Image: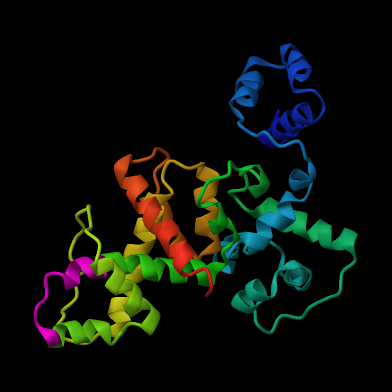
Amino acid sequence: MDKNGLLMLKVLINQFNPKAGFALLKFLPQDDVKELQELTVEAADLNPILHHPKAYLGRLHYTWLKHALEKIPQETFPFIYSILSTEQRQGIQPAARIIPLSEPVKNYFINELYSQCEDTAHLPIEYLPKNELSPLLGYNKDKLVQLGSFLGLYDLANEVRTIVNKTHLKNFYSCLTPKQFAFLKTCLQKKEIISVPKLSIDPSKQDCHRLKQILQHRGLLRLGKAISGMHPDFAWYVAHQLDMARGKIVMTSYAPQSEGKLTHYLKSQVVNLMNYLKDE
């Protein structure tokens, strides 16, 4: 039985009679029984499975869709563009012609595009275990990019602590927004318990573009470490809300197993920032 079939069976067992339902396992091949028992899903609602292709595609940044689109005949592109979100369409083909589609036709092309995506074996978001970072699954790309930029300020704080030249400090500070500068000051008041490499930027020169790139990269590395140990699909969804370049940074840093105190420490930084940026 394929993974989707096993998932549906698990949810149906949860829905009707979890204890009695597992008596059905004796009729399944042992490999299927093992996979079914490893599923930690406690949900009893089938709707997330039934609507998964649409939800899956809707969460992807357009850069992750380009490979799938290469496999689809160009004459169907007007239909495919019509099922994409505005943001996806703007990123792929801003001048795309949109065709009004009935629901059955729309669902057909959603399933067609979904079938061309190579990495679809993920739990629906609704089935993922809840945790204190679950709100990240509701963040769009802009909010995740902002979060990454602010997380990088912890690295900047480490750099600033070693600088006494006021001109060098000004070169950094002038690149920050007032809110970033305020958060940097709170970072400087706290002792960093992890060692990080220097930023590889010349403080004697003002290079705001380079600094923003570095802070974003460092912040996304912290985010990947912070979500280590969580369900792999949680990390996958967070990364794929970002563009491919940024998403790969998160996935490179993520590990299936928690890194103990390091993960706990970085997770607390992410939670702190989520609260700090809540009103943004």
Residue 171, image x, y percentages: 21, 86
Q: With respect to residue 71, does 100 lie above or below?
A: below
69 in relation to 166, above or below:
above
In reply to whether residue 240 is colored magenta, the answer given is: no
Q: Position of residue 79 (x, y in %)?
A: 79, 69
Q: Which residue occupies 53% across, 58% down?
A: 136
Q: Residue at x 76, y 36 (%)?
A: 44
Q: Does the magenta-highlighted stretch encompass residue 161?
A: yes
Left or right: residue 100 versus residue 267 is right
Q: Which residues are magenta?
A: 155-166
Q: How is the image coloured?
A: rainbow
Do we see residue 7 in this rendering?
yes
The answer to whether residue 68 is left or right of residue 235 is right
Left or right: 203 with respect to 87? left
Quarter of the image with the N terminus is top right
Q: What residue do we see at 56% from left, 56% from top?
A: 135
Q: Could you tell me how many numbered marks the image carries?
A: 0
Q: In x, y percent, where is residue 84? A: 71, 68
Q: Is 3 situated left or right of 261 in this image?
A: right
Asked if residue 196 is positioned above or below residue 153 in the image, the reply reads above
User: Does residue 177 appear anywhere in the picture?
Assistant: no
Farthest residue, direction left: 164
Residue 158 placed where, x, y %?
Answer: 20, 66
Q: Residue at x 62, y 47 (%)?
A: 120
Displayed quadrant of residue 71: bottom right
**Foreground: 51 or 181?**
181
The quarter holding residue 96 reads bottom right
Image height of 180 relative to 136, above or below:
below
